[in-house]
Image (spheres, helix red, strand yellow):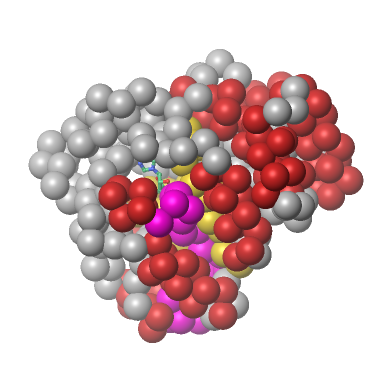
Amino acid sequence: MRREEILDLLFAQPFEAVCERAARVLEEEKGAHVHVRGLIEFSNSCRRNCRYCGLRCENGNLRRYTLAKAEIMAAATRAVALGADTIVLQSGEYAIDPMWLADVIDCLRGGLNVPVTLSVGEHPRAAYALWKEAGAVRFLLKHETADPLLYEALHPGHVLAERIASLRVLQRLGYEIGSGFMVGLPGQSLNTLADDIILARRLGVSMCGAGPFIPQHDTPLGAYPAGSAQLALRVMAVMRIVMPWANIPATTALATVDAQGGQRNGLLAGGNVLMPSFTPSAYGSQYCIYDNKNRVDMLGARKAIEGAGRSHTLARW
Ligand code: SAM
Ligand code: SF4
């Protein structure tokens, strides 16, 4: 599909028509099943300084934590018992001891026999290879915005090409890669959203997330308005049409800007993944990437799945 057609779906076609088309594609490609990924935010330490994120290293108003291996295993055991089909280990980008994370992945694979997805930022190829060897199968690394100038403005000292190069390295190592971007970033031109979708398609991502930008009061972008939930839903529906094969999450950011129906609406707009959090509650409030973060749990996931008339084999509630 050409850029003009994507722009037409994004900004000219009626919302309902785009969602109906996305629902048909979803039904044909993925059926009614919703994947439930158990998210464990194991550290809020970060060396980067992304201007939108509350975990940025210059934010001193944050108690930094890193979970012990036993805490991660306990959270993962609970997630699997409640029906999570994958464990997603997420953190700020910090100097993780590669051997330590490899050991955690190995224990999750061996002890719980559950697939492991990583979302830990940019690292040397050797670390990515070690974690793959230990059993990690997917890696989420959002490109955040396909506009190279905006990328540089939002990520001091970093360029978009680096991010794309990391995604390529991960892909060559055999990971299923996931990317994604924010909707409503300060300085984002609307047409860039079409480029975001085209970039994700060109990368051949297995998963792509598009959630609204949400301000965090301790960041340079803290006074800007949040992105629109409605536009994020439209972007998801267009992604479903353009990348029928992709797994598309109804993001926690969507559930934060629309606490009532955000994730259900995300499933109705072409989404087929939910990522409830299993981060121990003592730490969850310190993983404050944006303000008023809605901690979506398994109960919330079940409500969204039922509300959208979809299914998931959840062991216990
Ligand atoms: N540090 C890793 C990285 O950046 O890839 C993974 C963790 S990071 C907190 C996960 C995602 O949070 C980022 O890819 C970004 O899209 C999202 N995020 C951060 N700040 C946000 C904000 N203010 N609004 C919406 N999403 C945000
Ligand atoms: Fe760190 Fe990721 Fe937040 Fe950037 S988005 S500051 S890399 S946690």
Residue depicted at x 30% and y 26%: 224
x, y (%) of residue 244?
77, 51
Give yes or no for residue 131 being in the magenta stretch: yes
As displayed, is residue 299 above or below residue 42? above
Q: Which residues are magenta?
A: 128-148
Can residue 114 be seen at all in this image of the molecule? no
x, y (%) of residue 315?
68, 41
Left or right of residue 15, residue 276 in this image: left
Residue depicted at x 36% and y 49%: 150
Give yes or no for residue 50 being in the magenta stretch: no
Residue depicted at x 70% and y 28%: 12
Left or right of residue 31, residue 119 in this image: left
x, y (%) of residue 105?
46, 68
As displayed, is residue 26 above or below residue 124? above
Residue depicted at x 75% and y 28%: 13
Q: In the depicted view, which residue is nearer to us: 154 or 265?
A: 154
Can residue 175 be seen at all in this image of the molecule? yes
Left or right of residue 7, residue 167 in this image: left
x, y (%) of residue 226?
40, 25
